[in-house]
Image (cartoon, helix red, strand yellow):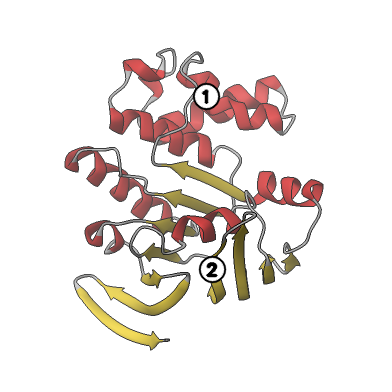
Amino acid sequence: MIKIEKLSKIFRTEEVETRALSEISLKINQGDFVSIMGPSGSGKSTLLNIIGLLDSASGGSYKLLDQEMAGAKEKVKSKARKENIGFIFQNFNLIDELSVFDNIELPLIYNHVPASDRKKKVNEIAAKLGISHRLKHFPQQLSGGQQQRVAVARALINDPKIILADEPTGNLDSKNGNEVMELLTDLHANGATILMVTHSDYDASFSQKTILMKDGVVLSEKLNHRNVDVLVTSKN
């Protein structure tokens, strides 16, 4: 589903050149649940933004569903993003002035889905995530866990082929955070492909594999078998 080879990202100013990613190579197959961990500044979010087609690489190859995205025109990337990727953010990124229904519906409007179909899909996903009784509420009337469920509903509304989660429990207490991780686990069990950036070893333990990054490179990849980690690759 995702194949990255020797991907690099360099940020340049007039005085400084910063290498955020240095020849990253990795592969994510359909149905995988993968976590990316590492200290701040390791390149995790930069990599996630490139995979999510929110940023561009400086070099290397990034193929999404066998289509080369590195160097692709913005129109091509925008289409691929809308059709294939759902985003879950740490800060929820809900629009306070819109109701829960309207927040979830928004991606369908961007994709020109007819109004009758939009209403049906929003009601279905809200029922699935247990937030049907909150559709007329506004984000500030919800708990953090409920807001993240709305964000998950919005991410899923277009039936994306891959879900990108950036610190999805970062602003939640342990109870609400655990609910979100159980929700992601259920989505994965039902066939979702998930790539998650996290600082939490506990959250990462829900995934099948953890990629450890530092200073823009992949240090290691390990399989997670419940509480038993098996080292499968290691790179300098």
Q: Secondary structure at mark 2?
A: strand
Callouts 2 and 1 close, C-beta under 8 Å: no
CA–CA distance between discs 2 and 1?
A: 33 Å
Q: Which residue is mark 2?
A: 21
Judge by depth and name the residue closer to the eye, 150 or 124. 150
First in residue order: circle 2 vs circle 1: 2
The residue tagged 1 is: 103
What residue appears at the point 73 percent right and 45 percent down from the top-left corner? 78
Q: Tag 1, which secondary structure? A: helix
Relative horizontal placement of residue 68, taking residue 36 as reference (left or right): right
For image coordinates 71% across by 29% down, the residue present is 113
Indicate whether 98 appears above or below 71: above
Q: Is residue 224 visible?
A: yes
Q: Please name whichever residue, 11 or 128, is drawn nearer the observer in this view of the structure.
A: 11
**Residue at image x 66%, y 62%?**
57
User: Which quadrant holds the C terminus?
Assistant: bottom left
- x and y, in percent, of residue 79 in the image: 75, 46
At which x and y percent is residue 221?
A: 39, 78
